[in-house]
Amino acid sequence: MAKSAITIRFGKTLREYREAKGYSQEELAERADLHRNYVGSVERGERNLALENIIKLAKALSLPSRDLFRGLP
Amino acid sequence: MAKSAITIRFGKTLREYREAKGYSQEELAERADLHRNYVGSVERGERNLALENIIKLAKALSLPSRDLFRGLP
């Protein structure tokens, strides 16, 4: 998957929220029932991730999913 | 792709915004550079669509993408 401005922006926002909560990538992955490598690749903007996983990540961060779209069109 | 509460909620919200703008599925599809059948399947909750297409649809509706997450966790 090629990075894009959109996937990069999403990944940065995800990382910011994860770090603000004090979670490691591994902790976030466990909470979201996703693989740690997957979370890392999302944060690096390498994934055009789909709706269900966006919701899983938002829930794992105790955030409304719309907050992950900050800075996106 | 199996429907889920999440894909169904997203599809309903998309349909509501599309109809509020007065676009047909075909018009929205053209504006978003997507196929009409695809837009129909998203609206029926049959697609776990990914980030890039969520942004395309929001742009085509002149909405911030976060608005499409109304009613979702």
Image (cartoon, coloured by chain):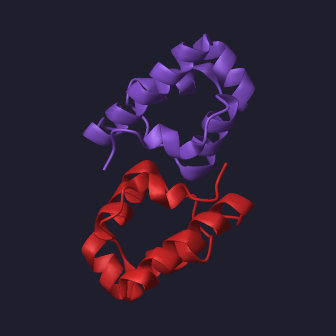
Chain colours: A red, B purple
Relative to residue A50, is residue B52 drawn left or right? right
Q: Residue at x 61, y 77 (%)?
A: A44
List x then y, in percent, for residue A18.
42, 79
**Image-based side of B30 in relation to A50, left or right:** right
Indicate whether B52 appears above or below A44: above
Residue A46 placed where, x, y %?
62, 70
User: Is any part of residue B17 visible from this angle?
Assistant: yes
Residue B58 lies, in percent from the top left, at 61, 37
Is residue A52 positioned above or below A57 on the image? above
Residue drawn at point x = 38 percent, y = 89 percent: A24
Q: Quadrant of the N terminus of chain A?
A: bottom right
Q: Nearer the viewer, residue B41 or A55?
A: A55
Q: How many marks?
A: 0
Residue at 54% across / 56% down in the picture? A69
Nearest to the observer: residue B2 or residue A54: A54
- State which quadrant residue B6 falls in: top left
Residue A48, located in which quarter of the rendered image? bottom right
The relative height of residue B35 versus residue A32 in the rendered view (above or below) is: above
Asked if residue B34 shows in the view, the reply is no
Going 64% across and 28% down the picture, which residue do you hit?
B61
Q: Position of residue B8 (x, y in %)?
A: 33, 32
